């Protein structure tokens, strides 16, 4: 399967490069105006209108080939079996080590001894479960 994917990808890349080259070689519609006034544009390799037909058809064929390769790559990319449904499922969660203070991050300094931090505890709820709502 990998050989097929590599071949399809190579054909897609070659057709893309071929299309880029052929599109850059083609002349626009405004270039025909210069040939009408005798600038020598009609003495081309393929004749007066032969180059436009040949280059246009070849560009169209390469575009169809590129589109077909893109569809095949999309199909093969979705057809492969997946072991997990999420990227994050296989990731291990590692908590970073947090230094006690900013001084511990400076090389050569020793971190001061950490002290216990007192956390306030919320008041207990009465055993009856009823909580009195304060009024104004």
Image: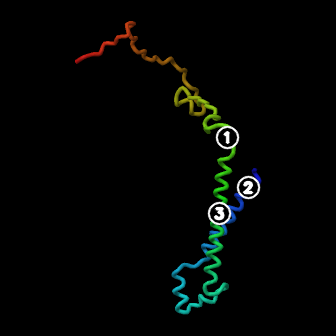
Q: Secondary structure at mark 1?
A: loop
Question: In the rendered structure, which disc, 3 or 2, sits on the residue that comes first in sequence?
Answer: 2
Q: Which residue is more in the foreground, 123 or 78? A: 78
Q: Which residue is mark 2?
A: 6
Q: Which residue is mark 3?
A: 66
Residue at (27% x, 16% y) in the render: 134
Q: Which residue is more in the foreground, 75 or 42? A: 75
Question: In the rendered structure, which disc, 1 or 2, sits on the residue that comes first in sequence?
Answer: 2
Q: Contact (CB < 8 A) between labels 1 and 2?
A: no
From what the image shows, is residue 134 above or below residue 41? above
Farthest residue toward the left?
136
Q: Contact (CB < 8 A) between labels 3 and 2?
A: no
Residue at (29% x, 15% y) in the render: 133
Residue 37 shows which numbered tag?
none
Q: Which corner quadrant holds the C terminus? A: top left
From what the image shows, is residue 76 above or below residue 45? above
Describe residue 121's horizontal placement relative to residue 52 as left or right: left
Q: Position of residue 47 (x, y in %)?
A: 64, 87
Farthest residue toward the right?
3
Q: Which residue is mark 1?
A: 82
Farthest residue toward the bottom?
38
The residue carrying pointer 1 sits among few (fewer than 14), some (14 to 19) or many (20 or more) residues within 10 Å by Cα, namely few
Q: Secondary structure at mark 3?
A: helix
Q: Position of residue 85 (x, y in %)?
A: 62, 38
Residue at (54% x, 26% y) in the render: 100
Residue at (53% x, 87% y) in the render: 34
- Between label 3 and label 2, give the one nearer the viewer: 3
Q: Quadrant of residue 12?
A: bottom right
Describe residue 47's horizontal placement relative to residue 4 as left or right: left
Q: Could you tell me how far apart the alpha carbons at marks 1 and 3 are, in whole angstroms? A: 27 Å
Q: Could you tell me how far apart the alpha carbons at marks 1 and 2 are, in whole angstroms? A: 20 Å
The residue carrying pointer 2 sits among few (fewer than 14), some (14 to 19) or many (20 or more) residues within 10 Å by Cα, namely few
């Amino acid at each position: 399967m990998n050989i097929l994917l590599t071949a399809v990808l190579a054909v897609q890349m070659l057709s893309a490069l071929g299309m880029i080259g052929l599109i850059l070689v083609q002349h626009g519609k405004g270039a025909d105006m210069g040939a009408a006034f005798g600038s020598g544009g009609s003495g081309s390799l393929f004749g007066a209108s032969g180059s436009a037909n040949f280059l246009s058809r070849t560009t169209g064929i390469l575009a169809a080939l590129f589109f077909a390769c893109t569809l095949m790559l999309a199909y093969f990319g979705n057809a492969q079996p997946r072991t997990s449904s999420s990227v994050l499922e296989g990731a291990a969660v590692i908590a970073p080590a947090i230094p006690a203070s900013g001084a511990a991050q400076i090389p050569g300094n020793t971190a001061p001894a950490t002290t216990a931090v007192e956390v306030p505890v919320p008041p207990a709820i009465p055993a009856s479960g009823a909580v009195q709502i304060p009024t104004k």
